[in-house]
Image (cartoon, rainbow, N blue to C red):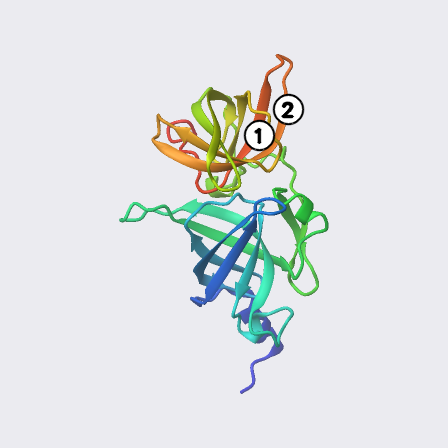
Amino acid sequence: MEPSVAEKENRRIQRISLPLPVRVEVLVDGTVNWNEITRLSDVSAFGAGFSLKRPIKRGRLMLLTIPMPRQLRCFDYGEAQYRIWALVRRCIAIEQRSGEPLFSVGVAFVGKKPPEGYHSHPARLYDTTHQESEGLWHLVEADLNKDDSDLPKDLRRQTRFHIPESLILELMDENGDVIKSETTVTENISLGGAAVFTQFDVEAGSFIRVTSLRHNIQIISVVRGKRVGPDGITRLHIEFIDRFFPLEGIE
């Protein structure tokens, strides 16, 4: 018997276990991106789950390339690969026996193209408001002052802690070589970024390697902006790229 329209639509909405390969691409700035090949853990026509070796903020956009079954697509039905933009809705660290970092990521599909202005500001955070007529999610810029304390921990935006964490900053050139270094402290810090006092004269988009001797870790970071405080000292606003900062005991 031929499935009813309602049954077909229900299949599109329900997440099904389908371990298809997926290429994940994230734009860091106008010229730099990172990508990773992984497998879906579950998928529907409007979202998916998978794991990554590095964390990503809730509210960030990514481009997915998947050999998606035709019945789960909202466009490009005849293409071999389904390229769709997706919004990160959760990112949770997973315990592994090997000790290697792994993060469970859940995304909502938002369309064939990113929002206008995205490529000029790829670090911009977004939120969903409603589903469009075809079922894909509509985006708006995230309200960074919104109270989300009632949400589960993995769905909350990352809280900034105003604590002086000692760090070593190493400015890197295009080849990844260190050209300057300084020891400083944070003005505030979260899992995914920090504001740090600095004597560096760098522009947004510069890459910095952050070292914490206390935690024995190094994190590749990108400068998102800078400002001079009322005390005359420059602060850099940096985003951690390849891992979260360990805030155990603080959160």
In the displayed image of the protein, which residue is found farthest to the right? 116
The spot of residue 167 in percent (x, y) is 43, 25
Looking at this rendering, what residue extends furthest in the left direction?
A: 97
Residue 241 vs residue 74, the one in the foreground:
241
The dot on residue 23 is none
Residue 156, horizontal then vertical, whole percent: 52, 39
Q: Residue at x 59, y 16 (%)?
A: 233
- Residue 232 placement (x, y as % from top left): 63, 14
Q: Which residue is mark 1?
A: 237
Q: Is residue 74 shown left or right of residue 220?
A: right
Residue placed at 62% from the left, 43% from the top? 125
Mark 1 surroundings within 10 Å by alpha-carbon count, few (fewer than 14), some (14 through 19), many (20 or more)? many
Is residue 163 visible to the viewer in this orientation of the structure? no
Q: At label 2, which amino acid type do we have?
A: Arg
Please state which amino acid type lies under the numbered disc 1: His
Callout 2 secondary element:
strand
In the picture, which quadrant includes the C terminus? top left
| Residue 205 appears in the rendering | yes
Q: Are marks 2 and 1 in contact (CB under 8 Å)?
A: yes
Q: Residue furthest top?
A: 231
Specify the label residue 227 is tagged with. 2
